[in-house]
Image (tube, rainbow, N blue to C red):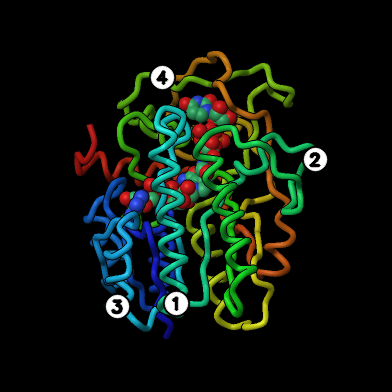
Amino acid sequence: MPKILVTGGTGYIGSHTVVELLEEGMEVVIIDNLSNSEREVLHGIAAITGTEPHFEEVDLRDRNATYGVFDLHPDIEAIIHFAAFKAVGESVEKPLDYYENNLLSLIHLLEAMNKFKVDNLVFSSSCTVYGEPDVLPVTESAALKKAGSPYGNTKKISEDILQDTMRSLKGKGVISLRYFNPIGAHPSAKIGELPLGTPNNLVPFITQTAAGIRESLSIFGDDYNTPDGSAIRDYINVVDLALAHVKAIRRLLDQKQLSAFEVFNLGTGKGLSVFEIIKAFEKTTGEKLNYKVVGRREGDIEKVYADTSYANSELGWRAEKGIEETLQSAWNWEMNIRSKNKRT
Ligand code: NAD
Ligand code: WQD
């Protein structure tokens, strides 16, 4: 069974992907510096799968330490690169931290791929590269817009770096996965999202509000040109998202002659508004949510959702889980961490 390096593997999407890779019988080596995750996540992964992944506490900005992991595991066949800083607002405050962390980490991994002869990479990209799309649903060939934040720009630049690097190298394959809005948690509620401090994203803010940690959810705008006035996104279950990574790894390992750089949208193909998410959450959990409408959040776009037909036909993947099941999983996770008193 292939050995896969997962950077950022104790993080939110990484941990769910590690679970699915282990369930497939693959061997996993995690690199994470724990800057936005906790070592305890490894116990959650082991409790679900019965297997402990290898774990290397390494900062990818440290080239020698990164090379050290490849020395230790010379049989790594493919890499899934999740590790990055991801907070849009923080990236505006600290752009150089974002450029340094997100770009240097990628460059060091690409150098390691060359040096240690690893041929396959799956990269975590984002629908943020599309900005406010001209046509919906948005396909992979849509024009990329100027990034709305330094964070978003690191994704755009990373894709450029990958494309340029792959052009110069023979026999390597890269798949860039553009995630829409990942939400929810593993159905076991043993792993999930652990936002530090006040969440920026909608669903963790909803679950924390329902749990009484936040007083009220602010809805950022009800005057958009959408049926109910609130903004529309494509919310994708994190387990569905994780399964797409398994498909991408299989595609890279199985098809040696694939084109060097491929891009796939990962979403459900369906747009939901903020009000629809709130209603679905209240319906499935039976919890009543305090909320108020406030002004639009700077930098937000009106609506975006994916055309997933390329991922459906070429990757053989589609999102399976419905929104209520997904929001219920987020709520189960919230209650689980609250009972363990892990967050104040
Ligand atoms: P996360 O913060 O939960 O996970 C990222 C992990 O990377 C963390 O565990 C962190 O400790 C680690 N990390 C960061 N910098 C590192 C470094 N220099 N060396 C080693 N480890 C490092 O984030 P996530 O939500 O799981 O996102 C994973 C990836 O998906 C990121 O690249 C993110 O940009 C991308 N993405 C996320 C979303 C989303 O909404 N969550 C959407 C689109 C794309
Ligand atoms: C969703 C909707 C908000 C919070 C971000 C990044 C993007 C990608 C995914 C990484 C929007 C509204 C939110 C709140 C609200 N990440 N909202 N009240 O902004 O679509 O995307 O995460 O690549 O790059 O920008 O996600 O969850 O923050 O917001 O009304 O308290 O919920 O306005 O319409 P977003 P989000």
Residue 43 visible, this angle: yes
Which residue has dot 2 on it?
135
Q: Amino acid at mark 3?
A: Asp
Q: From the viewer's perspective, tell me whether residue 108 is left or right of residue 168.
A: left
- Disc 1 from disc 3: Cα separation: 25 Å
**In terms of secondary structure, where does tag 2 sit?**
loop
What residue is rendered at 43% in x and 63% in y?
Answer: 17
Q: Amino acid at mark 2?
A: Val
Q: Which mark is residue 220?
A: none
Residue 279 visible, this angle: no
Q: Residues within 10 Å of mark 3 (few under 14, many from 20)?
A: few
Q: Amino acid at mark 4?
A: Ser
- Disc 3 from disc 4: Cα separation: 50 Å
Compare residues 86 and 173 and report the one nearer the observer.
Answer: 173
- Disc 4 from disc 2: Cα separation: 34 Å
The numbered mark, 1 or 3, whose residue comes first in the sequence reads 1
The numbered mark, 1 or 4, whose residue comes first in the sequence reads 1
Q: From the viewer's perspective, tell me whether residue 179 is left or right of residue 339.
A: right
Q: Which mark is residue 24?
A: 1
Q: Residue 306 in the image: state x and y as whole percent.
A: 69, 48
Q: Amino acid at mark 1?
A: Glu
Nearest-to-viewer mark from 1 and 3: 3
Q: From the viewer's perspective, tell me whether residue 155 is left or right of residue 318.
A: left
**In terms of secondary structure, where does tag 3 sit?**
helix
Q: Is residue 37 above or below residue 29?
A: above
- Disc 1 from disc 4: Cα separation: 41 Å
The numbered mark, 4 or 2, whose residue comes first in the sequence reads 2
What residue is rendered at 27% in x and 51% in y?
Answer: 34
Which residue has dot 4 on it?
216
